[in-house]
Every structure is written in C-alpha cells, then in structure tokens.
Amino acid sequence: MKRRASACSPPGNTPVSLFDTTPPRDEPGPARPLAERMRPETLADYLGQEHILGEGKPLRRQLERGELTSLILWGPPGVGKTTLARILARQSDADFVPFSAVMSGIKEVRAVMEEAERARRLGRRTLIFVDEIHRFNKAQQDAFLPFVERGDVILIGATTENPSFEIISALLSRTRVYALRALSVEQTVLLLRRALTDRHRGLGDLELTIPDDLLELIAAHSNGDARSSLNLLEIVAAGAPTGTVTRQTVEDALQRKVLLYDKGGEEHFNIISALPQIHPQLRPRCRPLLARAHARSRRRPPLHRPPPHPHGH
C-alpha cells in the first residue's frame, strides 16, 4: 500500500503515513504515567465489562467470529474505552487510526476516510477510533456515514455522554452502542495489585508494602476509574520512600473525595442514589455532596401525573 504523508510530518523527515500497519503497543518507559504503562494489551488482561466481553457475550462473539462492526463505547472516564478499542484492533488484525474529536475537523476526517477506502481495496481493514466522539458536530459526524455504511472502516467512538443525545441518529443506526460500567472495588484492587507486582511496567521494583484495607480505600476513592486509581497509587508510592505505606500516606494522597457530578444530567440521579453503595470509610466525606444533590433534585419540577379519579379510585 502506498503510504501518504501525514499533515503533521516534520519537514525534512521521512513521511509518516496516517496509518500504522499494526495497532500501537504500549512500550514501558519510566517517564510515562503508571496508568499509561499498565494498559492491558489482550482481552485476557482486560478487567471489567464481563457483560459484553465474557464468554458467550455479544462483543466477544463478534470478535471470535471475525465479524467486528462499527460501535460506540459509552461509559464514565477511566473504564477502558481507549484500551478496549486498541485490543479490538489488534485482535481483528486491523490498522488502528486514533482520532481526537477535540483536535480534528471535517477535512481530517475525509482525508482519513479516503485513505481507508484505498486500504480496503488492497485487502487491509481499518479501525478508526474517535475519542470523545460527542464533540463532533453534525456535519463532522455525517462525514463518517458513507464509509461506515459501505464497510470501508470499522468506526469505534468513545463517549462519556449519552449517545442518544449526542450522536446523530443516522450514525447510531449504523453502529451498535455498548455501555461500559465503572470498575468494582474488587476489580480495582486487582488492578492495583498488578501494578505493585509488575517489575517491567509497574512498581514491582519498589517492593512496596500496602495492607489490603488501604488498597481498598484507594479503590473506593477512585470511584470505578482505573486511571484515577493508578494515578493515586503512583502518588502514594512517591510518598513512601521507605517502601512501607501507612494510612497517613494514603490519606495525604487522597486529600478528598471527588465524585463525577454534572448537576443537571444523568450522573446527578446516579449520585443521589449512591450512598448505600459507597465504601463505609468514605461515607462521611461524601455526605455533603450527596445532600446538595438531593436538595437540587427536590427543586426540579415534578413529573407530570394524570389527575386523580373524581371518585378517588
């Protein structure tokens, strides 16, 4: 396949194609954040989302049959949307092209789609991953339609917003939406333990000693966000030069609980019903925010209900 220079190729350097013939691998490096270094590369290492990736589940069946189609990954931050897209590209032997809805416009979309069409004629599949796809306007989303419909590309969009409100109906009808769930405390603790013992990509060389209850506290504080939990663990490790992590070390790193909250949106109603599920050690810190959320919900106009029957039935 003839390679085409990217618009951002530096002058005088060898031109770089818009496409990589293999999906990216996460090479470890000491300067990279722990969360980036610990990205899983296979489904076997991927934590969570058993409702779509477990044995016999829909997305797993698509992969096993080699029938991966365009889809939207919808879920809160840090649940593995980007990581899953990379794994899907690797396992389906497709060229992986990451795209940022924040940095790219309709011109870039069309250029990538045209090259993907040429790649298909040469027998190569292309997986386009669009992060924060909800930030694309209608015209930009429209640009994907003919290429997705013809099968020139496999489009995977990632969004934290409800696709029914943020993705145009024509694109939704050509994709399948998978809702990703926040990690449980148990899954997050397992992730933290992996990072603590991995000498190649994680913190294994530090030989840190962290009691289970403190790992659970970090996991509960991260609110199901894998990236946040690993970032916290990295801060905790930096505050334990002797290798022993105490409760004070963890509390200094945590500072305070920050919940995902968008006041008027879907997370507002998720939060006001969350108190019974919050880790007992964190409930005192969460109550002020939950109280404000509950007060706000009481100020919202009530749902319309039919008038009572005149005879009281």
Image (cartoon, grey):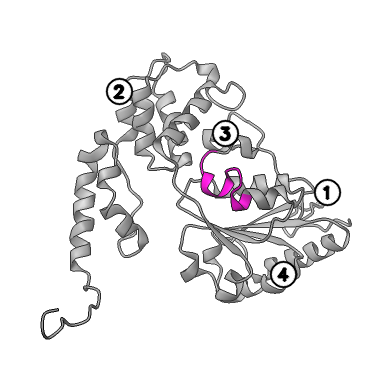
Residue at 41% over, 42% down: 224
Query: Reading the chain from its start, which is encountered first: label 4 or label 3?
Result: 3
Q: Nearer the viewer, mark 2 or mark 1?
A: 2
In this rendering, would 213 be left or right of 35? left
Q: Residues within 10 Å of mark 3 (few under 14, many from 20)?
A: many
For this rendering, which residue is in front, 143 or 46?
46
Residue 68: image location, x then y, percent: 69, 55
Q: Position of residue 46 (x, y in %)?
A: 58, 38
Query: Real-space Cα distance between discs 2 and 3?
Result: 25 Å
Q: Would you name the residue on which mark 2 appears?
A: 247
Q: Which residues are magenta?
A: 47-59
Q: Which residue is mark 4?
A: 110
- What is the spatial separation of the Cα atoms under label 3 and label 1, in whole angstroms? 31 Å
The Cα–Cα distance between marks 1 and 4, rounded to whole angstroms, is 23 Å
Indicate whether residue 53 is drawn in magenta: yes
Q: Quadrant of residue 133?
A: bottom right
Q: CA distance from mark 2 to mark 4?
A: 53 Å
Residue type, numbered disc 2: Arg
Residue located farthest toward the left when viewing the structure as drawn: 311
Relative horizontal placement of residue 24, taking residue 248 as reference (left or right): right
Q: What kind of residue is marked 3?
A: Met
Residue 295's label in the rendered image is none
Q: CA distance from mark 2 to mark 1?
A: 52 Å
Residue 209 point in image, percent of width and height: 42, 16
Residue under label 1: 14
For marks 3 and 1, the one nearer the N-term is 1
